[in-house]
Image: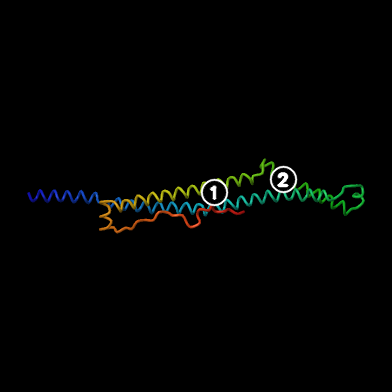
Amino acid sequence: MKQLLLLMLGLLLTGMLSGCGYNTIQANEEAVIAAWGDVEATYQRRNDLIPNLVEVVKGYARHEADTLKAVTEARASVGSIKAGRELINDPAALARFQQAQGEMSGALSRLLLVAERYPDLKANQNFLDLQKQLEGTENRINVARQRYNQAVQVFNTSIRTFPNSLTNSLLLKLERKEPFKAEEGAKEAPKVKF
């Protein structure tokens, strides 16, 4: 009878230890750590990607602006020189006229090359692409934060519910994890400057 009682007590203790939640708590804590790593990775992606995209957009917008500015300046230069009969009698005026016409031809050639390669100017599309990348990146960050908060909730619940709470208080002594909280002033969207 004593042996049966000891056997039953041993089986009961084994059953209690297997259901004590030790491994569950450990797995849940690892899930919290991994979820926070995802949040950090997403922030890093934003830090790596956005400045580069902004520079690409700025560079291309500058290229388009420079090309259009050159055409406008060449046109103004050509327009400032009056082409008349007196032009042929003044070698200096004729040289200025020819130089202005050459600058206009060069500017138009660059513009035509841009228009040939890119039928419509691309800066607008680059800005739209940047806007999509910004939106997508912010969405990724938000999803990573939400997943982190879910992992924190599962972990915190696992260390606070019975019998896991006993295992935690006697063996692990793990503290509750804090969910992600927005920074002060985070209600305002960040501003992108060009």
- Label 1 crowd bin: few (<14), some (14–19), many (20+), radius 10 Å: some
Q: Position of residue 173 (x, y in %)?
A: 29, 59
Q: CA distance from mark 1 to mark 2?
A: 30 Å
Tags 1 and 2 touching, CB below 8 Å: no
Q: Position of residue 158 (x, y in %)?
A: 31, 51
Q: How many marks?
A: 2
Q: Position of residue 70 (x, y in %)?
A: 74, 50
N-term-proximal mark, 1 vs 2:
2
- Label 2 crowd bin: few (<14), some (14–19), many (20+), radius 10 Å: some
Which residue lies under the disc numbered 1? 134
Residue in view at x 37 percent, y 56 percent: 177
Which residue lies under the disc numbered 2? 111
Kind of residue at badge 1: Leu
Q: Nearer the viewer, mark 1 or mark 2?
A: 1
Left or right: where 138 falls relative to 34: right
Q: Position of residue 52 (x, y in %)?
A: 57, 53
Left or right: where 33 falls relative to 193: left
Left or right: where 167 falls relative to 61: left
Residue in view at x 69 percent, y 41 percent: 116
The dot on residue 45 is: none
Kind of residue at badge 2: Leu
Residue in view at x 40 percent, y 51 percent: 149
Left or right: where 171 falls relative to 47: left
Task: Identify the colour scheme used.
Answer: rainbow
Relative depth, front residue between 48 and 187 = 187
Q: Residue furthest left?
A: 1
Q: Secondary structure at mark 2?
A: helix
Q: Secondary structure at mark 1?
A: helix
